[in-house]
């Protein structure tokens, strides 16, 4: 408890006293002091404002008046101090608002994680009430650090949304327009699942696949398909989650595969060209979905399973597909999550023909590989990777380390133990891929547009499951608008809605 009681200001307001007897607010006119506090906040209006220090909340009341569309997260030192603050009229008034939340310092970072939505609020602003800051100097550094770490994570997620939000939205709508129900598939779970990634070590471990092909049910990532095809190894399934057009080039190796075509497993946000190309060659198409809010809104209860991909890693998506098929043993090939022996990928990936065709005497394939690897800072490792054994001359990046860590976290979550690239789960899982509900695109899309229109007309709250489904698209629109700070969430919602109406041609 950081407070000891209250004292009357000159104009008759109750103000809190700290344990050392100092007042938190001006003893003469706390309202004037609060207006100065609010005026120091530089924002376009619809921001997420974190205020350290609640006290009598005069400063919070002024901030809410100046920024009526902002969300304010107010922090108090501890639970007892927070309960003490609830007696003040300005605190009671703030607590009645849906745009205000009070929490303890310990809960601050968690609430930033839950409440801060960049697409909705834009900026996140952290500011301290001066007197409260002076009295809580011992806890503030830790609070700030945890909030900054959370904001960094949110920023990374948001940057991905800002980059891919438009592609995801278009791909999902286009794929949904042609989707009714997933085909029934059954892979041989009596075999060990071999999940194939495209790391450099695949060049050597490929020999094991060739020798023991009949012992494995091979589930390839799309990037590794070319490497398998050049060795005449036909996978049983291929997993792709990439939204970009380049993903279609991975599947150009499909004609090299003889016999029955493998199942092509696509995220519903995958590039439509890749899906159509695989379909044109006779491959069965099986859709999965990530946690994208539009995919969740459209496909809950259908035969499209929610499949984990960590931080957007196709290797994890392939492992999770194997898990949901019922494999209790998964062996990883080429899952290096590092660069080794001067190579970014195994031979036969889509990069190889692109690099070789562009080679000159002054620009060799090795130079192109180096340019790809050194686009971000590299760190030399001891060659001991998580899933590929001992490798020579290895380098890694923070992103690749994150992929490896996320893969291990996925394995632990689902009860798989890891040893030497082998993931084992003691209990055989059940095939959870089949669903009965058939998807009707026209019915869904009509209802979708109707509910968004109700929000635009003001008959629904602005943040609901329909508008949440547009948040990645809005992030992308914000990125393209140089003066995005001048526009409200409602403005971006209207722009997103106008883009959606273009897709009505898909079923007319």
Image (spheres, grey):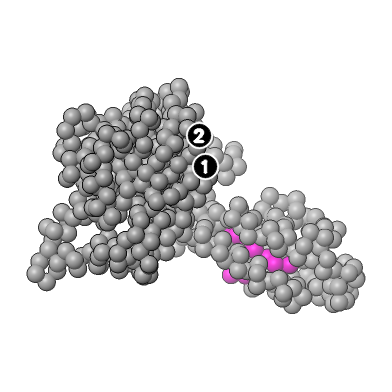
**Residue 321 image position (x, y, % from top left):** 40, 37
**Residue drawn at x 40%, y 46% as measured from the top left:** 422
In the picture, measured across the screen, residue 345 lies left or right of residue 182, that is left
Q: Is residue 493 visible?
A: no
Mark 2 touches mark 1? (CB < 8 Å): yes
Q: Which residue is mark 1?
A: 415
Along the line of sight, which residue is nearer the eye, 173 or 209?
A: 209
| Nearest to N terminus: mark 2 or mark 1 | 1
In the structure shown, which secondary structural element does the residue marked by tag 1 occupy? loop
**Residue drawn at x 64%, y 63% as measured from the top left:** 50
Cα distance in 3D space between marks 2 and 1: 9 Å
Q: Which mark is residue 112?
A: none
Q: Which residues are magenta?
A: 41-53
**Residue 145 image position (x, y, % from top left):** 60, 68
Q: In the displayed structure, would residue 501 be above or below residue 161? A: above
In the structure shown, which secondary structural element does the residue marked by tag 2 occupy? loop
Q: Is residue 422 visible?
A: yes
**Residue drawn at x 38%, y 30% as measured from the top left:** 189
């Amino acid at each position: 408890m950081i407070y000891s009681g209250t004292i009357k200001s000159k104009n008759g307001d109750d103000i809190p006293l700290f344990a050392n007897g100092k007042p938190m607010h001006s003893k003469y006119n706390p309202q004037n002091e609060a207006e100065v506090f609010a005026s120091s906040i530089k924002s376009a209006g619809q921001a997420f404002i974190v205020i350290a220090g609640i006290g009598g909340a005069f400063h919070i009341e002024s901030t809410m008046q100046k920024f009526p569309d902002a969300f304010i997260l107010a922090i108090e030192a501890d639970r007892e101090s927070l309960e003490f603050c609830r007696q003040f009229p300005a605190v009671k008034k703030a607590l009645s608002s849906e745009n205000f939340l009070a929490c303890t310092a310990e809960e601050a970072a968690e609430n930033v994680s839950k409440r801060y939505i960049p697409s909705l609020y834009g900026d996140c602003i952290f500011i301290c009430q001066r007197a409260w800051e002076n009295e809580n100097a011992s806890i503030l550094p830790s609070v700030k650090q945890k909030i900054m770490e959370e904001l960094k994570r949110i920023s990374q997620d948001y940057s991905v949304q800002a980059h891919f939000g438009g592609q995801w939205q278009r791909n999902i709508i286009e794929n949904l327009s042609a989707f009714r129900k997933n085909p029934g598939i059954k892979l041989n779970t009596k075999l060990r699942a071999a999940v194939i990634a495209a790391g450099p070590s695949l060049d050597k471990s490929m020999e094991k696949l060739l020798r023991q092909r009949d012992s494995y049910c091979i589930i390839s990532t799309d990037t590794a398909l070319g490497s398998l095809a050049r060795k005449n190894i036909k996978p049983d399934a291929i997993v792709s989650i990439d939204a970009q057009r380049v993903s279609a080039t991975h599947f150009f190796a499909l004609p090299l595969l003889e016999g029955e075509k493998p199942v092509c497993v696509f995220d519903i946000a995958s590039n439509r060209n890749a899906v159509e190309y695989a379909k044109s060659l006779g491959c069965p198409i099986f859709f999965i979905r990530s946690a994208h809010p539009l995919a969740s809104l459209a496909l809950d209860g259908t035969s499209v399973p929610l499949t984990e991909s960590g931080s957007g890693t196709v290797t994890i998506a392939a492992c999770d597909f194997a898990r949901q098929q019922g494999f209790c043993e998964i062996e990883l090939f080429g899952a290096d999550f590092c660069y080794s022996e001067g190579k970014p990928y195994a031979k036969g990936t889509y990069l190889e023909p692109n690099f070789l065709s562009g080679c000159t005497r002054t620009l060799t394939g090795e130079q192109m590989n180096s340019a790809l690897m050194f686009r971000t800072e590299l760190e030399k490792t001891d060659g001991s990777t998580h899933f590929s054994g001992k490798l020579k001359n290895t380098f890694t990046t923070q992103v690749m380390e994150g992929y490896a860590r996320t893969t291990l976290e996925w394995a632990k979550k689902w009860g798989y133990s890891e040893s030497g690239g082998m993931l084992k789960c003691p209990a055989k899982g059940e095939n959870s891929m089949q669903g009965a509900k058939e998807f009707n695109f026209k019915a869904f899309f009509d209802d979708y547009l109707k509910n968004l229109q109700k929000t635009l007309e003001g008959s629904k709250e602005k943040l609901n499951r329909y508008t949440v489904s547009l948040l990645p698209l809005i992030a992308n629109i914000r990125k393209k608008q140089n003066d995005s700070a001048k526009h409200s969430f409602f403005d971006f919602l209207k722009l997103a809605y106008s883009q959606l109406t273009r897709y009505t041609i898909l079923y007319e």
